[in-house]
């Protein structure tokens, strides 16, 4: 299998393996997006007089067939095909002949990859938002089903003031919805058309019209100037990873609460057997592994963000091959987030709070009592605080 | 100096020093914001019948005088005063007596601190945006003054296609403007009124009206429900730090380019003596320290973000003292960003490109030539690529 | 396929998939180590009278056969087998019947996994050390072959004082050897026998002798007390990842130098075609992708370290399921380091310095001249510095 | 105040402030070490015939007096003095005249700074080791005083098997001692003499003898070759920060346990009032802030490590000004570690376990029972596990 840029020099297999890395595996999820972007590019070439009608038709049909075959699992990007972009062009040219060799006019792998990635990210962000929306809805349902159950409100992990299952669940639901907002704002960075920037310096001598691919691919704007495109690599990706990190932090803290509530000592919640696992030596145990893993993935999300920020850090401008390494942590974090949302949405409806076990300290109303003194007797809050304090203070 | 929550127990000085940490120093920048928020809170208490007119006046005047005295450097938050909130209440009560002891009704240090912090962040984000706007403007000026100078466009640090100082500078200007947008979007997370959430569980028995403080402090929304407020700690802060990180990454990459251009081997730019420093043993040297430090601060920005994300990670919900540690990395990163923007705005107008030294490879037009063959002869791009490639290929 | 801890409760497939995660895939590299440790454990059980001779023989033969079959690719750990430990016990019991069910006496999956992991880490560290040793040797060879070629010594990326290819290559060789030392010191944390700690609280009522498994597995010490074992999870792993990070940082900086030297503007080195790749649109280009990717992997190494540190951070003591997530970043970083060492060892002998292109500034001897004045004329260094400075100073 | 490298060019004050950064403040802790290294360097110069006896005496006396005056607080490094090295040379020359101007022969600020830093790090590591040793001793005392108190052993935060205060405390003590070992091994990277490497390329034309400064400063080895010295910047520092991170992670996890044990729901421990703080609105509360802050500093330690790794990542070899930024996170983490060790050593003896409140589940002996069946009846462990499991299993 010849690689597009192989001009005859013997290419050491180890170099290929090293430089291709995980790319072929990762690129499979971009194939459909690359096809869509390539068709838009071909249509633009046709409209600009650089591709005959018949050639466009052949390219469009060929690409659509390749996408369908890929979706059916009939082929996938392999090491020999090197990466998704090379794979598509190679297979297309095998299929339709010379017209395939016309497709790369006016674009480079740099803008081609980035376009596919941005189209993918648009979808991924939407999926993440939907997953998070589902979890927030499940928390609402929990608040409405079990919300009336009293719960201590904690500060410093100490019982502080009265709260409820409703307040607890709604607090998380509100923050998760805030994360959805954050995710959706990342569209701002994603949604700029890279096509036409080519390797980062435009397409001299070709009458390429970026506005046409922009419209076809529903990008609100072209990414301008062309030099900004590669300079921006990693930024939209980092933005998505950052918003995912906040979302997974919120899920992780929700899990931390539940792990605390599920201890024998708290005993505030029951979990169904289907959501706990056994021990290899302690037959009595039912372990809340799902919540532990959700908590642990907080660290994975952060690390993926750190990796992407580290890849682009301090690089001179212009495309650099380092940027290829962004995909792995990007996909890893998105996948983990989708799985965590999915499992939380399934687990939360099964959490049953146990009012029989939840006990609020007598002292938990101290602040409310002090407030009452202020409201009824008109004394300063500090005086009320001291008066109530004297009453509730545990003896040394 | 008695601390507000000191109920007589002997408090080990080491514990005080350890728990207060750097707080007193850091809190000085929050004093003015705390005064503003405390006055809004006091006005609300008055409007709800919890504070007499005269008391409100005394509080307002007292706080304004304290703020002014603080601004004049007449007092500052010290270890003995513990933290900014304790300091203000202590000094106010010393000044105006019993009315001061009424101020804390209906709020906790938790919502008090957070309100001051958010008011500060609103200003900080605006300052950062202005600083970045200034740098972008300086890049525009550079593009307009020296933009016509030809520059190689690089990929893989290799000369790739023709570019220009204009394209180079405008690429960075565009991305920095994108960062400004990112920064301003962080207002979404900052701009929610925490007042009235108290310790995180509201203010039972007190007719507190959150809507009133919200309006007075120009927050577009109340942060609801009360349990979400402390759960959100670190999120708006992390968002600001993330956007700052992207901004400092862009500045760092700009610095990387300039450091490359300033090498004797490239020799593309000259820097004035005022922006370089000497060596302690090599008398001939002029070193571009400013750009090295801007590049290095990329790492500091990332680390501050990592620190804040790490502080909140996996914590059970409800206020925890760990959250106090957020302020140090938050302020550190903001300060570094402001300084870096300031120095870059001063340095960039002094960068002089040297057309006499900038040499574009003959081969740099190869892609344009291939494009021309496509456009003029109508051959497929791959064929044009091979034809030009055969011509320009360096002999083995 | 029944899971060991499945006591009849219906186990939701999504929970299995979520909790198993990537484990089955990752555990394949631990199978041989687990077999070795399991045989040592079985021998100990036999020596302590808990396993008959025939049972031990059956277990040993069965495990050895399973290991051989696994090595031949005849089976692998799959999602249905859940993880490597469950897989081995299940397959063994299918193979040899009831004796297999005796193997888990006196151990838990917690100490079982950790033992296999530590045996693996011992080998991995040795492999990394050898790979690094090879690269250092290649640098020595480069110093001996091309070492006499003069090279500018840089500070601040500016020519500072005369250096040579020998000094340049030997500097990196020395630091890589230092990294090998660092790696080998990580054995200190790895080399403690976990067996006998079971779930972290020992094996009450069973006369288990840790000293015997310690000897058999060549651990210099037992990990004591039993509660320290799980508390230490992630620490030896982080130590290895940290040392790998320093190693990859050194490789990354070596790559940075070469990328600089390979620019057309420096032109200090040539690379063979086999180690460069082409461009999809610029037919003239040969890109140094290998070195870019080695530079980029600096970030991956750091991120893996951050992930492991984040996973264990702030967890209450005792085994937690979060710890399972350590394996993925651990293996990822080790693999990347091995690949990077391998490719650098192959690439470096092909780097050819070009004395015709390397030009040292006239001023580069200024410090040596000042030194000479000090040595010959006995004047203070500061005076010599000023005198030479006046001579070499570029006019404003 | 003239700066050493100021050759008359007007130096913009903003550049000075930006480049000096926090250096003057940070360098104060290095003054005594710099004096010690400078005296060793001067003695070597004298022994090599580059400094007269009288000059050496003047330098030694002058430096010792400056060090003493600095220790008494009579002067400190200020922005005007720029940094510690410039400050010392300037003040010395003011004090003793021309001999001071001879001191810099054969060294650069690069090796000077690094030598002072390494001498400091040797002491800092020792202080950290002593602080950690003290905490481990306090845990031993706790084990000996209260060790007999039964404690549940947890896995997955669930009661798993019987443990004790002794096992709990000794587990942490063992791991902290392991961290001390790790810290002490970092001497390997610290303990190489940088003097004589000058700016990184040695001292041509000067008969400098590195072996003499090596002996005087008790470095086991010279750092060879000279090019390795600056290449190693950040590595010893990162090693110390890494070991500190593991130590602070262990302290943070100890704190996490105590925070759990101190909840009202567990109620396993009591803390004296001196180690808790009050609430501003809830008069009944005593908060365990000390342990929360120790837990939170886990994140700071990690971030300091990330910062140092990020500063050196991907830099071309040779000194770069970025390296100056290492000091701030290095000192920050060391200080935080020392404070955390100090407060933990003070806090732990005050933790009182409450046997009246600690309740072990009946089921906690299930594994021991299964073990007993194995030992007494000789049945396979899996059968014993199932038999006990059937008995203890909670009804659905």
Image (cartoon, coloured by chain):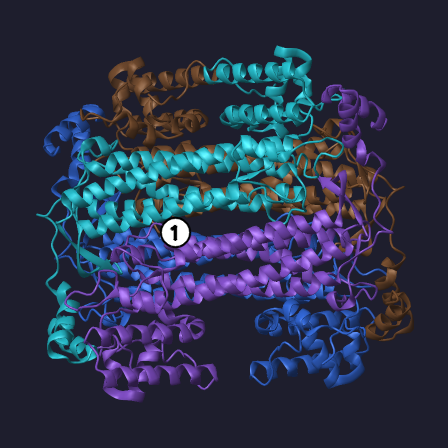
Chain colours: A blue, B brown, C purple, D cyan
Q: Position of residue D274 (x, y in %)?
A: 21, 30
The residue positioned 65% from the left and 73% from the top of the image is A84
Q: Position of residue B78 (x, y in %)?
A: 38, 21
Badge 1 marks a residue whose secondary structure is helix
Q: Nearer the viewer, residue C236 or D220?
A: D220
**Position of A189 compared to B112: left or right?**
right
The residue positioned 36% from the left and 42% from the top of the image is D296
Residue B125 in sight? no
Q: Nearer the viewer, residue A385 or A219?
A: A385
Q: Position of residue C177 (x, y in %)?
A: 58, 53
Q: Is residue C179 above or below residue B347?
A: below
Label 1 crowd bin: few (<14), some (14–19), many (20+), radius 10 Å: many
Q: Nearer the viewer, residue D172 or B99?
A: D172
**Position of D389 compared to C86: left or right?**
left
Residue C216: name its quadrant.
Answer: bottom left
Mark 1 = which residue? A175
**Position of D389 compared to B3: left or right?**
left
The N terminus of chain A is located in which quarter? bottom right
Residue C34 in sight? yes
The residue positioned 23% from the left and 77% from the top of the image is C46
Q: Position of residue C293 (x, y in %)?
A: 64, 60
The residue positioned 84% from the left and 70% from the top of the image is B385
**Position of B138 compared to C111: left or right?**
right
Q: Nearer the viewer, residue C118 or A352?
A: C118
Residue C214: name its quadrant.
Answer: bottom left
**Subunit ID for the residue under disc 1:** A
What number of labels is visible? 1
């Amino acid at each position: 299998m010849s690689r597009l840029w192989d001009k005859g020099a013997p290419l050491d297999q180890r170099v290929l393996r090293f430089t291709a890395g995980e790319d072929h595996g990762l690129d499979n999820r971009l194939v459909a997006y690359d096809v869509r972007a390539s068709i838009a590019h071909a249509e633009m070439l046709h409209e600009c007089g650089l591709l005959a009608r018949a050639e466009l038709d052949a390219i469009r049909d060929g690409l659509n067939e390749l996408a369908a075959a890929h979706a059916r699992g009939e082929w996938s990007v392999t090491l020999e095909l090197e990466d998704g972009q090379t794979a598509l062009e190679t297979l297309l040219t095998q299929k339709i002949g010379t017209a395939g060799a016309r497709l790369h006019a006016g674009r480079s792998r740099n803008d081609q990859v980035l376009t596919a990635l941005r189209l993918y990210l648009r979808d991924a962000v939407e999926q993440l938002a939907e997953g998070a929306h589902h979890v927030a809805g499940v928390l609402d349902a929990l608040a409405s089903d079990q919300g009336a159950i009293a719960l201590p409100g904690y500060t410093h992990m100490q019982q502080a003031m009265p709260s409820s299952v409703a307040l607890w669940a709604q607090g998380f639901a509100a923050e998760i919805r805030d994360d959805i907002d954050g995710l959706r704002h990342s569209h701002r960075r994603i949604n700029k058309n890279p096509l036409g920037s080519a390797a980062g310096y435009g397409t001299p001598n070709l009458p390429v019209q970026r506005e046409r691919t922009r419209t076809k691919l529903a990008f609100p704007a072209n990414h301008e100037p062309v030099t900004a495109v590669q300079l921006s690599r990693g930024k939209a990706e980092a933005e998505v990873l950052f918003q995912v990190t906040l979302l997974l932090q919120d899920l992780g803290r929700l899990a931390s609460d539940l792990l605390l509530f599920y201890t024998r000592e708290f005993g505030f919640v029951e979990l169904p057997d289907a959501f706990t696992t056994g021990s290899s030596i302690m037959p009595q145990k039912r372990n809340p592994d799902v919540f532990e893993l959700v908590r642990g993935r907080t660290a994975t999300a952060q690390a993926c963000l750190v990796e992407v920020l580290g890849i682009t850090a301090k690089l001179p401008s212009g495309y650099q091959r380092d940027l290829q390494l962004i995909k792995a942590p990007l996909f890893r974090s998105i996948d983990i987030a989708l799985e965590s949302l999915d499992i939380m949405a399934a687990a939360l409806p099964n959490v049953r709070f146990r009012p029989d076990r939840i006990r609020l300290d007598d002292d938990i109303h101290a602040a409310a009592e002090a407030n009452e003194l202020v409201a009824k007797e008109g004394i300063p809050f500090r005086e009320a605080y001291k008066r109530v304090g004297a009453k509730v203070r545990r003896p040394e």
